Image: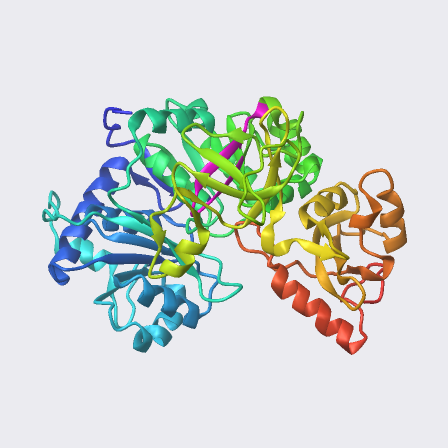
């Protein structure tokens, strides 16, 4: 946008509780000094850098050190096991890894598997076998400037991992978005509503695609970032009040947790500063949309996209309750085609097909040309989502192709069933998926977690669904299980259905019922 630099004393980043504050002037000085000192420790032919830690001021500082040195950047999911992280670090050819001290044991465990790493940097204190961020800062005097380089940077974001090794979604550094299109995206995402000084709450993990996009926008707009290392709904609302946050992204599961804070407690927080809220990463239930709009006002945007595709479709606040099942119209600069199983285009409204998009696709999957070729259709790219358009051009996501249940030759989309179940006031969370059936091939199973104190039987739920969804899409009463524990989810809000399905099948094989104190059906 060509904005003038911010005043040096403008707040750059702070933790949600008010600690760790760093101004833009201090940030720029620390970034350059650390980059200068690190460059002296690394050979010229370095390629990539990783950051391994929860959201923090140091996290974004190290991200910007990588940018300054032109290193291709890979954020690491701190939920992964040491072996999985070692795979990512080695696969992205990391030369330097920045990590938090709480993960020092994981870093130590993977050293033998990551021989390419040339420097280990602990972000928040001294650590055996690593240089501290503070030590690097002291090695370069104020005013130091990093050396010139011809590296192009870029990003490798690792996706999935539940069905095999994570795939690295590669965007090369030469891939740039034209300024006019970036401005249009800022408008469509509701970011411009937050000007002239965006204050962004970063509560979803930085390693995910949408938070990374918000981070990029905020850096270009000289925003103030408020970081939460782990999400807590009441603390998030307190941070909004304390820092006068005017925008944030949260996946639906976190938005739902905001609404689970009692109305009495929510009323105590001053949240009128909020101008933009974005949901994405998973389908947002209609009742969550309604609750967020009631609490914050007409500020909710819904995004459909993927690490591989960018933000493909946007639903603005003006339409979000009128078409609660749609994720919006195709964003500026994107194009989408729907293909049937024979790779023929579908042009008829209401007919579902696999979604292929182009406009801001990744260059390729890192070191996985076969996976890249499988996902491509000419200039278009797919992540396996299935959807359809209505007559007005609004996109609806039916489900992911791999999650679709085929029962007796009929396609059943779990997301549509989950949307209905989410509307029941006693249901806190739901996962719908297919389980083997000797007669039909697959049958629908629904795993439910009730709200605290909720009472519901399978029969009551299925009777309640009459008139809301076709009966053929629903599970039988014997295929509804109730659970007391939280379902396995990524921090982006995506259900880990494979893990949950395996748990259900194991319990069924033992003839047992799902865990939990609520009324439940036997499996």
The answer to whether residue 263 is above or below residue 405 is: above
Q: Is residue 384 above or below residue 299?
A: below
Dividing the picture into quadrants, the one containing residue 268 is top right
Q: Main secondary structure of the magenta part?
A: strand
Is 394 displayed left or right of 512 in the figure? Answer: left
Q: How is the image coloured?
A: rainbow
In the depicted view, which residue is nearer to us: 311 or 339? 339
User: Which corner quadrant of the image does residue 12 belong to?
Assistant: top left
Q: Position of residue 217 (x, y in %)?
A: 36, 34
In the image, is residue 159 part of the stretch drawn in magenta? no
Q: Nearer the viewer, residue 445 or 194?
A: 445
377 with respect to 2 (left or right): right
- What residue lies at 32% left-to-right and 24% top-to-bottom? 180
Residue drawn at (18%, 51%), measured in percent from left and top? 35
Spot occupied by residue 440 in the image (x, y as percentages of width and height): 78, 62
Q: Nearer the viewer, residue 226 or 39?
A: 39
Question: From this viewpoint, is residue 320 visible?
Answer: yes
Residue 251 in sight in this render: no
> Which residues fall within the magenta stretch?
303-317
In terms of depth relative to the viewer, which is nearer, 304 or 140?
304
Residue in the picture at 13% in, 45% down: 142
Residue 484 appears at what percent x and percent y? Answer: 73, 60
């Amino acid at each position: 946008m060509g904005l003038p630099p911010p005043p040096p004393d403008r707040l750059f980043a702070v933790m949600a509780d008010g600690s760790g504050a760093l101004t833009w002037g201090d940030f720029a000085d620390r970034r350059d000094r650390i980059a200068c000192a690190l460059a002296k420790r690394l050979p010229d032919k370095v390629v990539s850098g990783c950051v391994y830690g929860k959201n923090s001021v140091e996290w974004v500082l190290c991200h910007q050190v990588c940018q300054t040195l032109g290193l291709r950047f890979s954020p690491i999911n701190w939920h992964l096991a040491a072996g999985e992280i070692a795979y990512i670090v080695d696969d992205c050819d990391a030369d330097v890894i920045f990590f938090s001290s709480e993960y020092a044991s994981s870093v130590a465990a993977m050293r033998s598997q990551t021989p390419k790493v040339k420097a280990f940097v602990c972000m928040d204190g001294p650590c055996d076998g690593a240089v501290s961020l503070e030590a690097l800062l002291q090695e370069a005097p104020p005013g130091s400037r990093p050396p010139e380089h011809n590296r192009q940077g870029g990003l490798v974001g690792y996706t999935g991992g539940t069905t095999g090794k994570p795939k690295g979604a590669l965007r090369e550094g030469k891939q740039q978005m034209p300024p006019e299109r970036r401005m249009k995206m800022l408008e469509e995402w509701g970011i411009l509503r937050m000007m002239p000084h965006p204050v962004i709450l970063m509560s979803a993990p930085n390693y995910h695609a949408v938070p990374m996009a918000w981070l990029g926008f905020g850096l270009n707009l000289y925003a103030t970032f408020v970081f939460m290392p782990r999400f807590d709904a009441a603390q998030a609302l307190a941070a909004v009040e304390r820092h006068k946050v005017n925008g944030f992204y949260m996946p639906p599961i976190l938005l739902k947790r905001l609404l689970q804070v009692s109305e009495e407690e929510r009323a105590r927080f001053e949240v009128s500063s909020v101008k933009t809220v974005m949901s994405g990463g998973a389908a947002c239930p209609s009742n969550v949309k309604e609750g967020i709009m009631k609490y914050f006002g007409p500020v909710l945007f819904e995004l459909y996209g993927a690490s591989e595709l960018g933000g493909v479709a946007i639903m603005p606040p003006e339409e979000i309750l009128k078409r609660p099942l749609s994720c919006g119209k195709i964003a500026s600069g994107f194009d989408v085609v729907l293909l049937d199983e024979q790779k023929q285009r579908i042009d008829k409204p209401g007919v579902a097909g696999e979604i292929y998009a182009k406009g801001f696709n990744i260059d390729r999957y890192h070191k996985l040309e076969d996976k890249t070729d499988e996902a491509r259709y000419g200039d278009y790219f797919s992540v396996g989502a299935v959807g359809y358009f209505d007559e007005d051009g609004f996109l609806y996501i039916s489900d992911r192709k791999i999650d679709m249940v085929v029962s007796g030759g009929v396609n059943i989309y779990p997301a549509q069933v989950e949307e209905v179940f989410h509307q029941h006031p006693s249901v806190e969370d739901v996962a719908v998926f297919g389980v083997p059936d000797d007669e039909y091939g697959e049958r629908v199973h629904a795993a439910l977690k009730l709200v605290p104190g909720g009472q519901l039987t399978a029969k009551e739920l299925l009777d309640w669904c009459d008139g809301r969804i076709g009966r053929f899409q629903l599970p039988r009463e014997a295929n509804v299980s109730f659970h007391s524990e939280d379902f396995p989810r990524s921090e982006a809000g995506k259900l880990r259905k494979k893990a949950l399905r395996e748990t259900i099948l194991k319990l069924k094989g033992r003839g047992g019922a799902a865990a939990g104190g609520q009324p439940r059906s036997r499996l």
